[in-house]
């Protein structure tokens, strides 16, 4: 699943997610855990600055979150 947020394409690999919620602690305005305890995008998300979003993706211990910039360069992981 993917979504364009704050000028970045954020990709969630739900098969890799182990539900630590580290991303939510950094960017709770973007991410939440669903009923399976797997990260998903909030339906009413608010866009944080890019730095916060990159940090939220980078704290995932299993690299289930990928951030790609507008030029197609992978920023995280």
Image (spheres, rainbow, N blue to C red):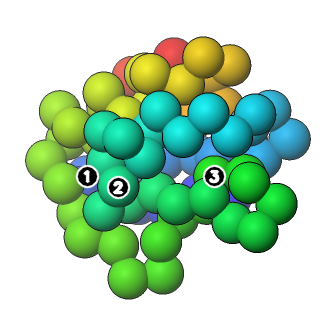
Q: CA distance from mark 1 to mark 2?
A: 18 Å
Quadrant where the N terminus sits is: bottom right
Residue name at image x 86 percent, y 41 percent:
15
Query: In this view of the protein, can residue 65 be seen by the observer?
Result: yes
- Residue holding disc 1: 7
Question: Can you tell which mark lies on residue 39?
Answer: 3
Q: Are marks 1 and 3 in contact (CB under 8 Å)?
A: no
Q: Which residue is nearer to you in this view: 25 or 30?
A: 25
Q: Which of the 4 image quadrants contains residue 28?
A: bottom left
Q: CA distance from mark 1 to mark 3?
A: 20 Å
Query: In this view of the protein, can residue 72 be seen by the observer?
Result: no
Secondary structure under badge 1?
loop
* Figure check: 54 above or below 25: above
Residue name at image x 51 percent, y 17 percent:
77
Sequence-earlier tag: 1 or 3? 1
Sequence-earlier tag: 1 or 2? 1
Q: Which residue is nearer to you in this view: 68 or 65?
A: 65
Sequence-earlier tag: 3 or 2? 2
User: Horizontal and vertical percent for residue 7?
Assistant: 25, 52
Q: Are marks 3 and 2 in contact (CB under 8 Å)?
A: no
Q: Which of the 4 image quadrants contains residue 5?
A: bottom left
Residue density around tag 2, few if under 14, some if 14–19, many if 20 or more, within 10 Å:
some
User: Horizontal and vertical percent for residue 17?
Assistant: 74, 37
74 vs 55, left or right, is right
Q: CA distance from mark 3 to mark 2?
A: 11 Å
Secondary structure under badge 2?
loop
In this view, the mark in front (1 or 3)? 3
Residue name at image x 18 percent, y 54 percent:
48
36 vs 33, left or right, is right
- Residue holding disc 2: 28
Q: Residue furthest bottom?
A: 44
């Amino acid at each position: 699943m993917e979504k364009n947020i704050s000028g970045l394409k954020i990709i969630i690999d739900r098969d890799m997610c182990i539900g630590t919620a580290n991303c939510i602690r950094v960017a709770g305005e973007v991410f939440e855990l669903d009923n399976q305890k797997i990260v998903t995008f909030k339906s009413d998300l608010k866009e944080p600055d890019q730095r916060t979003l990159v940090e939220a993706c980078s704290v995932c211990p299993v690299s289930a979150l990928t951030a790609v910039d507008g030029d197609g360069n992978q920023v995280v992981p």
